[in-house]
Amino acid sequence: MKYRYSTHAIFLAGFIFAVLPAWPQKDGAEIKGAPIDAPAEAPADGTSAQPGGAPQGQTLGKALPQASLDLLQKAEGDAAKDPMKFEKTKDGKYLKVTFNALGSFPYEVPDPDAILASPTPNKPLKDQIPPKLKELNTQPAVVVGFMVPVEVDNKGGVKSFALTQNQMYCCFGVPPSMNEWVMVNVQGEPAKYYSDMPVAAFGTLEVGEEFEDGYVMSVYRLKCEKVMDVRELLQQSKG
């Protein structure tokens, strides 16, 4: 059975995953991302992927490793310097889209009653999304961030997840703005779960509000073709 969750439910799930070190399956196995210190997939510039430096956030004894945040920054690379440029990946298939671009404008969540009472219900009351971002709608794109699982199968495979720039947002009880995360729906085989390792999600990006009963469920969605550990992405970029 498939369930639909509100934004608050998505980030409640994120809180659970951020606090728990691993999620046990029925057979006792654990769902984990690749170890943060895995040597085989170290960053392309030769720096260590060992955790280090001051943690960016602390909650119930668990911090998001600084090394993970550093890897996210490395994976975004030059795309983060000029976020609205949207350069293509090395193979020319995907546009590089960062959260600096997606969250570059203030987004005001519309009143659901006003939405339902409008002549065109389930459509935005005002146009808030910049034209440059609207042009990304239906375009092949890759976005790098952290997983907050939403729908998981009975084997631990992730079928849908919220992709955020920093999963620690949810742990402080303050979800990101609606334009600071992407709802990712995995097409085909479910993705592997990565707890505190950034991932690259590849697929077709959808830009524009999705409404349900007057409520904005998402501003960005990705029909995801593949999910990749960013260390693998960095290794590929060396070739």
Image (cartoon, grey):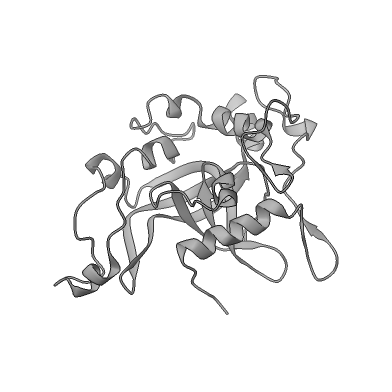
Residue that extends furthest to the right in the rendered view of this protein = 28
Q: Position of residue 150 (x, y in %)?
A: 57, 63
Which residue appears at 84% of the width and 69% of the height? 27
Q: Position of residue 25 (x, y in %)?
A: 78, 66
Q: Nearer the viewer, residue 171 or 76?
A: 171
Q: Nearer the viewer, residue 214 or 44?
A: 214
Q: Quadrant of the C terminus?
A: top right
Q: Position of residue 156 (x, y in %)?
A: 71, 64
Q: How many numbered badges does the structure rendering display?
A: 0
Q: Nearer the viewer, residue 139 or 118?
A: 118
Which residue appears at 31% of the width and 57% of the height? 109
Q: Position of residue 46 (x, y in %)?
A: 70, 19
Whether residue 192 is visible? no
Which residue appears at 68% of the width and 49% of the height? 195
Whether residue 72 is visible? yes
Q: In the picture, residue 12 is in which quadrant? A: bottom right
Q: In the picture, residue 16 is in which quadrant? A: bottom right
Q: Quadrant of the N terminus?
A: bottom right
Q: Does 45 sit left or right of 141 as displayed?
A: right
Which residue appears at 66% of the width and 31% of the height? 66
Q: Is residue 39 above or below residue 17?
A: above
Q: Does 45 sit left or right of 93 as displayed?
A: right
Residue that extends furthest to the bottom in the rendered view of this protein = 1
